[in-house]
Amino acid sequence: MSEKSFTEEQKQYLSGFAFGTDVARAVSNLPIISGSGGNSGNGTSLKIGDGPATIDGTAFPTRPENIALQAQADTESAGGKLCNEEKAKREKNPLDMWDEIAARSDAGEFPKGTDVFLTKFHGLFYVAPAQDSFMCRMRIPGGLLYGWQFRGLADLSDVSAGGYIDVTTRANLQYREIPADQAANILYGIRELDVVSLGSGGDNIRNCTASALSGIDTTELVETIPMAKRMHHYILNHREMYGLPRKFNIAFDGGGSIASLDDTNDIGFRAVTVPPKHASDDLPAGVYFQLTLGGITGHKDFARPTGVLLDGKDCYEVAGGIVRVFVKSGDRTDRKKARLKYVLDDWGFDKFIAAVEEEIGKPLRRVSEDRIVSVDNEDRLAHVGFHTQAQAGKQYCGVVLPVGRITSDQARQLSDIADELGNGEIRFTVWQNLIIPNIRDEDVDEVRRRIEAMGLGCDASSFRAGLVACTGSAGCKFAASDTKADAMRIAKHLESQFTLDSPINIHVTGCHHSCAQHYIGDIGLIGCKVEQDDDMVDGYHIHLGGGWGGNQGIGRLACEFVTAVNAPTTVAAIVGSYLEQRNDNETFIEFTKRCSDEELKTLAVMSVS
């Protein structure tokens, strides 16, 4: 068939059809099945390259999402073998599965095979065998919702999920215990509340985080929740942002008193200042964003400065360029190496930034560190209790949630408080709690009374304020231990033994995915199985001395194979040793930093069994 044989209508049809299954086959050098007869390589042919795609020489518009297909083809051309997840994405675009998901829901069926993985792109995780149900993760950019939305999400959970909502370490929300026949109702229901889940799982950019006190913080340099929202919409409206080799995290930090943990993200935008004495005509004094790359603490690495300084308005374009370079260059053969960190380790920062500049078509401004002033205003108790806002006569309240879980009824009551005694906003934090802002000074006592009446609290001990736990084996097939229950037992035991003058953050994660970021906790526990007589029981390896920001560091292994039953007393022994051996007013992180590896291992040795 010649180029002239196509009518305009046929060209339009082929433009859409060819970029489906046939594109996948074309880029992997497989024959294209066309019409009723198929072909043996001498019929209709499709080509994807740097220029427009062609069908038998007829050019069609290049689609941005094709860069992922091209990356897969380039991997195979170089002799690489695509991992199973990449093959699954090539055979079926997960963004085009809406009807399939709805049909399965109508039939009361869960996905099977690679469809389990692909369905995650819509935020639905089939979590068997831990639970024979779906988990649904949402996208709450910057962690900001309104009372009417939170109330609606609570109602939806009662109808279609477990009757509770979990707050995550990305200031996000999750449902659990969703039956197979409720999957579509969940997806429809959250959209009717102006909440989406597209790209919240699978190989995608996860919820964009920001400083939880954006716009109300007395110490921040710049508001960042509006930036997280704009980045969120950029992602949703650029289809190529969904073609990554693996998951990806972006955070904005405004320099305020609640950290967004930007240095644990693939891309961190951290607010800094250029003071007048270091300013110039091409770099006026003011607030900028320092670009950092490659954070992935589960792999023991933090985001590192690139030397690039950005105006706020440029962050979205640059982030898009970074993601596109990663789409083209990330490892598609080994899932364990398919993160941005490994591209940076292989290429180096200079080569990577040069590729980003080429991608966006302009140079990026580099500024030496000695012209930049970084701030450290973090207050590790700022996310709990009542605090004065930047606005006169207003306070915000940080509500303590038991390792991030809240019942639907509590969510409705908190929504009522936000609507009646605040301005309707509810903000979630990376510490798995929530904040109700804009409370009048004269309403503080009433807010406290109503929060305590529903079984929650505004105040937290130095152990509970920084207590973080992932879902654990109660809801995740990868976890080796019941992290949420164990975390609460540890906190309760510590509270019965000690009163501290500074907080100790305890992070309890169930597996190597490190959803609770155990490596950055003062005390970090990662689940394992422990041999006990003829059985294997839940247990933990314990790391000490992790930190972020100004106290950046990866926790060091102190003890291994501690049973979950013994974890509370083991952690108590560590805290007791710290209190006995510390110097005056020395914080836990300061204490552990001056301890050798061997000294850390002796802190709990007597209590480990």
Image (tube, rainbow, N blue to C red):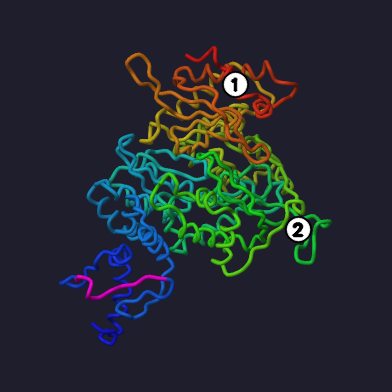
Type of secondary structure dominating the magenta stretch: loop
> Which residue is labeled 1 in the image?
598
Pointer 1 or 2: first along the chain = 2
Q: Nearer the viewer, mark 1 or mark 2?
A: 1
- Residue 415 visible in the current orientation: no
| Amino acid at the residue labelled 2 | Gly
Q: Residues within 10 Å of mark 1 (few under 14, many from 20)?
A: few
Residue sitting at 34 percent across and 40 percent down? 127
Which span of residues is magenta-colored? 39-49
Secondary structure found at label 1: helix
Quadrant in which residue 87 is drawn = bottom left
| Amino acid at the residue labelled 1 | Glu
- List the single residue furthest toward the front: 79
- Residue 521 visible in the current orientation: yes
Q: Is residue 209 above or below residue 383?
A: below
Q: Is residue 312 above or below residue 48?
A: above
- List the single residue furthest toward the top: 606
> Which residue is labeled 2 in the image?
286
> Which of the two residues, 390 or 382, is positioned nearer the viewer here?
382
Q: Is residue 80 above or below residue 567?
A: below
Measured as percent of width and height from the top left, residue 106 is found at: 25, 52
Residue 213 shown in magenta = no
Measured as percent of width and height from the top left, residue 383 is found at: 62, 38
Residue sitting at 27 percent across and 80 percent down? 10
